[in-house]
Image (cartoon, rainbow, N blue to C red):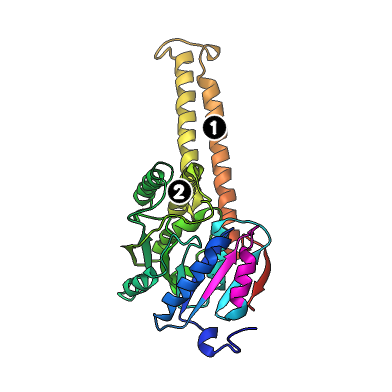
Amino acid sequence: MSIISHVSDTEQNPKLSIFIPVHNEEASLHGLHRKLLDELAKLGRSFEVVYVDDGSTDGSLKRLTAFAADDPRVRVISFRRNYGQTAAMAAGIEASRGDVLVGLDADLQNDPADIARLLAKLDEGFDVVSGWRINRRDSYLIRVIPARAANWVISSVSGVALHDFGCTLKAYRRDVIKDVRLYGEMHRFIPIFTSWAGARIAEIPVTHYPRGSGRSKYGLSRTVKVLFDLLTIRFMAKYWTKPLYLFGGAGILTFVLSFVSLSLALSMKFAGWPYQADFLQTNLPVIAVVTFVLGIQFFLIGLVAEVNMRTYFESQSNPPYSIKSTINIS
């Protein structure tokens, strides 16, 4: 039986939304939920907690269902299968109703007490406040060193100077995150997406605890995926709305190379410069033909990309996940 029998207006329109991706974290959920509610009660703001069960195979969903049954401020989304953290965060953001949204990990390595500090920094006029796990309690060789290298590269390429893009504990104003569309493994790049919309971004140190139960879902392979995603981010930053500029530029370069190769081949055959050579005695005619065809392909790819961009901006995107059930969510 629910301990709260009705939903007030403030609960229907909370000021603060906490969204939490969950995947096989049954052992940590009770402690996390108790501590989270204790810290949120101190804030004096109406709130909701949105749990997104990302296809857990343990008893995580059962625990989340019990939380929601006892408190209508707790809302649960259950995926049909495991779609990954980015999809879970996208669903949590989409379902959140608060003016301020805060992301949190479910493994108790983040401290819910840091939420108050994020909100205080946000109240200084910032649009996004990112947590920095300055004393990260993970494997130094497998997690910390690759993460530092990846964060340095991301900051250098994106121009957004953060020490810890991978920290889930971040606070966002709704107006800068509501239009962000996430897919693949792009959740760590949310500050970059918001910066494109003119968001003011700050970073503060946050507490980080060792994992007490379960196992990490990340490894060295994640660093390679981040680098691939970073290439996508770089392309999106410079050529997202004008891909023909990139592919057209590459096409012009290959056309120039084709013209130079053909001119040099003709010069060698008919003028003997820089030395006498027939077409069959040099690879220049082959290079001229190949680069000419390659240039045409670059232009065609650019045109197709332009059409795709127009289709993207003129149509509605489908979410990158499938929901099986929800609780306290209409």
Could you say which is closer to the camera, residue 151 or residue 237? 151
In the picture, residue 4 is in which quadrant? bottom right
Residue at the image position 37 percent from the left and 62 percent from the top = 131
Work out whether residue 92 or residue 3 is closer to the camera in this orientation and state it.
Answer: 3
Please give the name of the residue rendered at 60% of the width and 70% of the height, measured from the top-left corner.
64
Mark 2, residue position: 230
- x, y percent for residue 139: 41, 46
Residue toward you, 4 or 123: 4
Residue 153 visible: yes
Instruction: Tell me the element at label 1.
Output: helix
- Residue 137: x and y in percent read 39, 52
Give the magenta part as a residue range. Answer: 49-68
Residue 162: name its quadrant.
bottom left
For the N terminus, which image quadrant? Answer: bottom right
Which numbered mark, 2 or 1, is in the foreground of this view? Answer: 2
Amino acid type of disc 1? Phe
Q: Quadrant of the C terminus?
A: bottom right
User: Helix or strand or loop: what does disc 2 sit on?
Assistant: helix
- The correct choice, above or below, for 200 with respect to 71 in the image is above
| Residue 94 % position (x, y) | 56, 70
Residue type at mark 2: give it.
Leu
Q: Look at the image and say whether residue 67 sits in the magenta stretch.
A: yes
Please report the residue visible at 39 percent of the width from the left and 71 percent of the height from the top: 115
- Residue carrying label 1: 292
Question: Picture coordinates of residue 208 (x, y %)?
Answer: 38, 59
| Distance between mark 2 and mark 1 Cα atoms | 30 Å
Q: How many marks?
A: 2
User: Residue 93: within the magenta?
Assistant: no
Q: Are marks 2 and 1 in contact (CB under 8 Å)?
A: no
Q: Residues within 10 Å of mark 1 (few under 14, many from 20)?
A: many
